[in-house]
Image (spheres, rainbow, N blue to C red):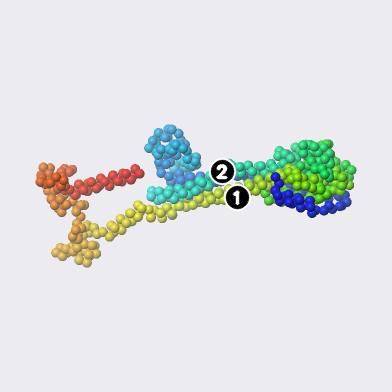
Amino acid sequence: MIKTSYLIRVSAIVATLAYLASSAPESGEHGHLFRQLCELVNLAERPAPAKIIDAQAQVSYLAIAKLNASVAPQSWRDTIASKTEGAAHKQQIASAPAQPAAPDPREEYWKQAAAAVKDSDTRRQILQTAGLADVTEEQLANYRRQLNPIAEHAFQALQHVTQLATGPEKDKANDALKALKIAAYGRDDFTPAGAKDTDCKGQDGTGTTRQLLCGAPNTDAKANTIAQFMLCVCGVDGTDNNKLCESSQSSTAFNPSSTPEQVLKDLLSKCPQPSPKTPATAAEVQAKATALINAFQQKGKDTYYGFYTGTGCSGKSNQGICVMYKAGTKQELETLAAHPWLSQLQTAAKLLHEHEQALSKLAAVEQTIAAAAKTAYALKSAAIADERHSPASEQKQQADKTEEKQPTNSNCSDTAKKTATECKSLGCDHDEKENKCKPKAGTEDKVAGTGDGAAGTTSGVNCSKHTKKEDCEKENVGLAQGDKAKCGWIEEKCRDSSFLINKQFALSVVSAAFVALLF
């Protein structure tokens, strides 16, 4: 259906344009109509609009995926490799994480990225590009944590591009070109060199005479393409022989029943080459269609394009060299608007507009993914900053501060002579008799200093004095059930209970570290 604006415009033309009587046109006087028609047929000869493709977006996203593969843990890389290298590789990495039952939509890109960074040189180069050649494992972990949301954002954007590239939008540019071809010639496979006589006879091939093709009062023209308009307003009449459109056009009279395609080929060859040699735009097609409608004039209840005095568009200068349609009622206006030369121009304009909107969306999303890739390769400073605020780092910093504040008994037990002031600055007491530092009361090293049962142990017994197992175990005689043993024969020595405490503590630390490695 034609847009309401076109019905209003055509109605306004019918109602307001007066018939302008004139003498027969001279040679060249339809040149302005010929140029207008040439511009319309040339729309179909212009280059095709840019395609909706996701190639550039794929490149940008794969750059992120390659970086992701390069910073990923080895277990992750092994899992992805198993998906690309087959069962033999899977047997080598039986400890790799289990694969999900349903394939992840990102998996195909992960495979491509893993294949691209399979060799160590490529991976090293990617890490260098991102400034990650000399980072710590903790920094790399922080980098991965910050890279994940960026990669996911880029993936979702890529999905949108893929929908554009594979959805209905991908065909609209080609469909618009087909519509322009049909408006110009009646078929989308038309070429000037391959013009046929059926291309010159109008709707259903019923325009077998010039007047039937081009129209008469109260009778619609059979002409339904722009090329047929060209025949009606430019074709030479056998009586007048005026070359109305172009000075070098053929002198052969136009007769739809006698090789009309030769006249059409000649006229099309006289059209200027398409200019500019760029794809047609929706606005351009719309403007040219509007200009064509506005060029129609009114005679009674009929509207015509070209020159008319009376009788019909027979090609004779004393009758009409024109195209004429009925335009006295709403129904007649709708019928006029349904002719391919107008309806297909409208369709082409609509499709081109939708295609241009899709291209605009594509460009915006491509920029988004490209920006994400740029950000992904510039995360090092953020990762290092994030490391300073990570729980592990903060715990280490706190431990360092505590260690700095806590005086060590080794300083206080130093045998070097020191004054009371010097000992105080070390957090120690001063032994006036020996003129040296000593640990403050209650801060003696009761664990670390008793590894072999030295004096001052928690048991109150010097276990290390015993050299035999039976003597060592006698120290525990008389202890109530549940009391902690004073001494024990361990590693061929008699040791006190503090050694057991230290031994158990060391084992617990090692166990905790092992668990941390597993998880």
Query: x, y (%) of residue 271?
Result: 77, 46
Give the quarter of the image for residue 69.
top left
Residue 157 lies left or right of residue 507; in this view the side is right
Spatial distance from mark 2 to mark 1, Cα to Cα?
14 Å
> Which one is in front, 46 or 415?
46
Give neighbour class at mark 2: few <14, some 14-19, many 20+ (Cα, 10 Å).
Answer: some
Residue 417 lies left or right of residue 159; in this view the side is left
Query: x, y (%) of residue 458?
Result: 16, 52
At 77% across and 45% down in the image, what residue appears?
332
> Which one is in front, 2 or 146?
2
Q: Is residue 471 above or below residue 435?
A: above
Mark 1: which amino acid? Ser
At 45% across and 52% down in the image, what residue appears?
379
Q: Quadrant of the C terminus?
A: top left
Tell me which label, 2 or 1, sits earlier in the chain. Answer: 2
Label 1 belongs to which residue? 360
Dot label at residue 163: 2
